[in-house]
Amino acid sequence: MRILCIIATLICIAGSPCAQSKPNILFLLADDFSYPFTSVYGDKIVKTPNIERLAKQGVVFTNAYAASPSCTPSRAGMLTGNYPHKLGEGVNLVGKLDVSIPTFTQILKNEGYYVGFERKGWGPGDYTKMGYTENPAGKEIEFKKVLKEIKPDQPFFFWFGTNDPHRFFPFGAGKRNGINPDKIKVPGFLPNTDEIRNDLADYFYLIERFDSEVGELLDMLEKSGRLKNTIIVLTSDNGMPFPHVKANLYDHGTRVPLIISHFGNDFLKNTLNTSFVNLIDLMPSFLDMAKVKNQPAVDGMSLVPIMRGLKKSNREEVYLERERHCLCRIDDGMLAGYPMRAVRDDEFLYIKNFRPGRSPAGDESIPGTPSIYGDVDGGPSKALLIDNKDDPAIKYYFNLSFGIRPSEELYDIKNDPFQLHNLAGNVSYQGTLKKMNTKLLAWMEKENDPRRNGGGDEIDRFVGTTKAWITKWGIVFEDQ
């Protein structure tokens, strides 16, 4: 008997890991990766063969949305499974995520999982100012080291948080790496100029670079013998860092890729799913994947029944929200945000702007700071719009991104995929406007949203853990 035990141990150490009762989970979280810019969703320019490999081994969701189009609250929503407005100061960029709020990483660690992350986890923000001794995403460590250090029979949850395709893009990288800017179809909210096409080409290059890293991670898993017992989830925290997109509730700001794969036999394969998903659904999904029995009550809904073919849909619509992104308005001691809520279904997107007198992109400038329209990431596209705002060919696009907006917005998704034509004032759509408004307000009441009934000004008084100023071309982080 002793000889058999020794032989079994040697097999576990020298060959494939011993059978685990729970699967490993590899979470591939991109930074500012909008749907549909991958070949999986039909894009003809962006080549992503490794993401395609994942798609063939799982379910591709076509209607996945970030709870908030801003890094910190989006990631906090994923970690906790709750709408960002329920997270106190965690609702804002660089806001505090209270350590007392349960996260899936804490729970998985308590369940015996090795939990780690590489590069960008929860953030941006300073977790040491909110009761944490390590990033809420787990222990910071390289994935290759985890595969070497982990016990053969211990499951892991690993968060690979690439910084791609976040700005700043290596200038000209797209063209240098074989992406032809002249073949790029520019989204309708941006002007079709050489500068914009080149900026998009550089953005697409970073998506392809992320895809290459996905391939490297899959190779590591395969060589370690853990690939078949690892569930892989790929998505993004919010949409692309361009004007009219990031920090906005339009589709390109909130709609993101989502692929859940398994090289074993637990889940459906090569399947397209059109049901609505809010990324807060990942928290209960991860816990179900890990077979956690005692789970906290959350707003998210597990996707595991869909992955196993037991049901086709969880949601008929998604509810989205945004508070303060950057410090970019002189009001309230530079703490004023731009509060928005939205409901998106198969036909329409309805947005409620609660402080329409404020600039959605931030003030043009703030004395004593480098901020310039600070809710729009700096770069060539932003600079082009600002520098040419009086040019008749550019003025329309400048106003789309930087102009004042009304309190209500309504868009016909099928006929207006870029959300350019607000129907809120159209008499033919007043019935739809009322219906969507009623739906949103009922959700806000049900979910105890601080912004219901005209409230929520306390959110603007929350002080972040760090300061961030966005300029015409860049970003400046300043510790408090």
Image: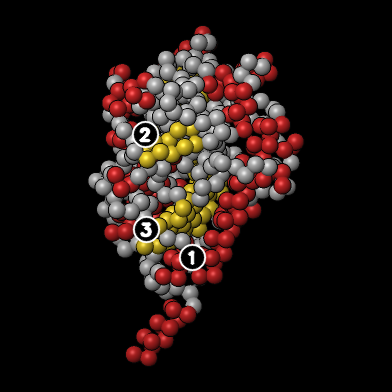
Please give the name of the residue rendered at 34% of the width and 50% of the height, measured from the top-left corner.
Answer: 136
Please give the name of the residue rendered at 50% of the width and 70% of the height, measured from the top-left corner.
Answer: 224
Q: Residue 280 location, x and y as percent?
A: 39, 41
Q: Earlier in the sequence, mark 1 or mark 3?
A: 3
Question: Badges 2 and 1: C-beta atoms under 8 Å apart?
Answer: no
Above or below — where is 338 with respect to 70? above
Marks 1 and 3, how far apart at CA: 14 Å
Residue furthest top in the image: 427
Res 139 label:
3
Q: Mark 3 belongs to which amino acid?
A: Lys
Q: Residue 345 location, x and y as percent?
A: 48, 29
The quarter of the image holding the N terminus is bottom left
Q: Residue 175 location, x and y as percent?
A: 71, 43
Res 32 label:
none
The quarter of the image holding the C terminus is top left
Q: Quadrant of residue 395?
A: top right
Q: Nearer the viewer, residue 283 or 276?
A: 283
Q: Earlier in the sequence, mark 2 or mark 1?
A: 2
Left or right relative to 352: residue 217: right
Q: Nearer the viewer, residue 363 or 185?
A: 363
Q: Mark 1 belongs to which amino acid?
A: Lys
Mark 1 secondary-structure assignment: helix
Q: Residues within 10 Å of mark 2 (few under 14, many from 20)?
A: many
For disc 2, the marked residue is 92
Marks 2 and 1, how far apart at CA: 33 Å
For disc 1, the marked residue is 144
Please give the name of the residue rendered at 30% of the width and 48% of the height, measured from the top-left corner.
Answer: 128
